[in-house]
Image: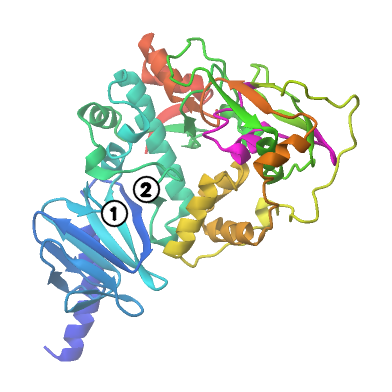
């Protein structure tokens, strides 16, 4: 056999080898989850020997705990071996990364000057590593089944929207669904996954959008009041059974300065705050809009935008009441609306945010995560990034370029005519759209099965297989 013929055969066989390694089983639906993005080096391990298959189809034995370092464009080095990317890592026993064990295989991809690590596995096994992070295994099985179906539907819709951009389908953080591999598996949540295998929520025959949250506080929210979309099966519904959620009621006090800072971050700067009051509410009493009155005029804003700006762990839901500071002097009459100050740039519409197929670096990913945790992005922007991952870099660039006024120091709070603290008393936790996890538990405690629970939270939808 000539050298040229051997080379040609190797090129034909290599893709087939990769397919065989990635295949989980004959009837499995694979999913790829990014565990680490654009890292200069990665340490993986297994209790059995690890085999690497490089882009040329060559197999290499790497031992049980190799360190893989980015080595030039499109390659990775393991000891003295230089492997051309993409590289597939497989082992007889589960692979481990960052102290967690994972089913399936690992895929190494070139990402800028580093390497991205992706876990490729069966969708059903992926759900086993998700469910315990979302609900308690001790809950009624029907509530766990409802969560399994919602999480499966959410993952499949995300896969179809992302279309494999960046070389993977989903991340492993709360920006997608929290995934922790074998470490998060539990017998009861495993049972919920296996007993609903392949079942998803459908709307008009298509995979539905199935957001979920911790606790609705008694009634879910209409998606139009949170993310601006109009989806028939995501209208608010009133829960008939109270839950025993630890966030059934909550309260938090914010200084006038903190409220003013949140208003600025929500693009509703009214200067020195004189009054913050509830504007419109939905039929169940959930707050849709707020009206802020200050030295620069008055602004009406979505309560969800204010919540995200103040911090979603601070204002836990939009089902709240506001008690102004004692001694405050509310405006006697409405003040004309003021434009956003010139020191801050107004937000571009989502349609104007540029797209990018260039993978984000580890530093950029860290910046985006930090900005998200600081509630820099509102609900519409977070949803847009989820549905259009190629916009994530555009949102990051825009956020870094936007000049936001600094929050006043604590002593300056006395400049507000409403000095002191605003007291927010609320119910529930989360954006309020779709399935309430604690609400589903309460319904299951009353004997509802998962079908009835899902029909309640997503009215007009059906269950089917995918």
Q: Is residue 23 visible?
A: no
Q: How crowded is mark 1: few (under 14 residues within 10 Å), some or many (20 or more)?
A: many
24 and 465: which is toward the camera = 24
Residue receiving disc 2: 172
Residue at the spot x=63%, y=31% of the render?
254
For the magenta stretch, what is the residue range? 293-320
Q: Name the residue under label 1.
A: 119
- For label 1, the SS is strand
Q: Is residue 438 left or right of residue 78?
A: right
Q: Which secondary structure, mark 2? A: loop
Task: Count the labels in the image.
Answer: 2
Furthest residue in direction left, as rendered: 48
- Rendering coords of residue 272 (x, y %): 79, 39
Quarter assignment of residue 13: bottom left
Is residue 116 found inside the magenta-colored segment of the image?
A: no
Picture quadrant of residue 129: top left
């Amino acid at each position: 056999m000539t050298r040229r013929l051997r080379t040609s055969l190797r090129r034909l066989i290599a893709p087939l080898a990769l397919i065989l390694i990635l295949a989980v089983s004959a009837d499995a639906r694979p999913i790829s989850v990014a565990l680490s993005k654009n890292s200069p080096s990665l340490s993986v391990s297994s209790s059995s020997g690890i085999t690497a298959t490089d882009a040329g189809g060559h197999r290499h034995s790497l031992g049980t705990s190799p360190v893989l370092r980015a080595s030039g464009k499109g390659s990775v080095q393991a000891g003295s071996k230089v492997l051309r990317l993409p590289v597939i890592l497989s082992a007889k026993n589960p692979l481990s990364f960052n102290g967690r064990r994972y089913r399936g295989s690992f895929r190494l991809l070139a990402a800028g000057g580093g390497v991205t690590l992706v876990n490729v596995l069966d969708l059903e096994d992926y759900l086993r590593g998700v469910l315990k992070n979302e609900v308690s295994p001790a809950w009624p099985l029907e509530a766990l089944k409802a969560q399994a179906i919602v999480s499966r539907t959410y993952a499949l819709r995300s896969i179809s929207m992302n279309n494999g951009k960046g070389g993977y389908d989903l991340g492993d953080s709360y920006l997608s669904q929290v995934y922790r591999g074998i470490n998060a598996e539990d017998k009861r949540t495993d049972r919920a996954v296996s007993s609903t295998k392949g079942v998803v929520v459908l709307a008009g025959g298509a995979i539905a959008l199935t957001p979920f949250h911790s606790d609705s506080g008694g009634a879910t929210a209409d998606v139009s009041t949170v993310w601006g979309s109009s989806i028939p099966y995501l209208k608010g519904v009133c829960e008939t059974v109270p839950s025993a959620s630890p966030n059934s009621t909550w309260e938090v006090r914010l200084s006038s300065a903190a409220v003013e800072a949140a208003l600025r971050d929500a693009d509703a700067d009214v200067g020195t705050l004189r009054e913050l009051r509830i504007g419109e509410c939905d039929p169940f009493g959930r707050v849709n809009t707020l009206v802020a009155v200050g030295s620069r005029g008055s602004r009406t804003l979505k309560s969800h935008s204010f919540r995200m700006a103040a911090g979603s762990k601070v204002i836990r839901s939009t089902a709240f009441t506001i008690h102004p500071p004692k001694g405050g002097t509310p405006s006697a009459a409405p003040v004309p609306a003021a434009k956003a100050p010139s020191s801050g740039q107004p937000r571009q519409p989502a349609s104007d945010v540029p797209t990018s197929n260039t993978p984000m670096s580890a530093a950029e990913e860290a910046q985006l995560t930090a900005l998200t945790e600081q509630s820099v992005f509102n609900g519409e922007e977070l949803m847009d990034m989820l549905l259009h991952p190629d916009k994530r870099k555009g949102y990051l660039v825009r956020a870094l370029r936007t000049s936001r006024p600094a929050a006043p120091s604590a002593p300056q709070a006395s400049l507000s005519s409403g000095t002191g603290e605003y007291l927010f008393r609320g119910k529930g936790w989360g954006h309020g759209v779709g399935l309430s996890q604690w609400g589903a538990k309460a319904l299951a405690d009353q004997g509802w099965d998962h079908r009835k629970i899902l029909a309640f939270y997503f009215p007009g939808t059906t269950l089917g297989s995918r």
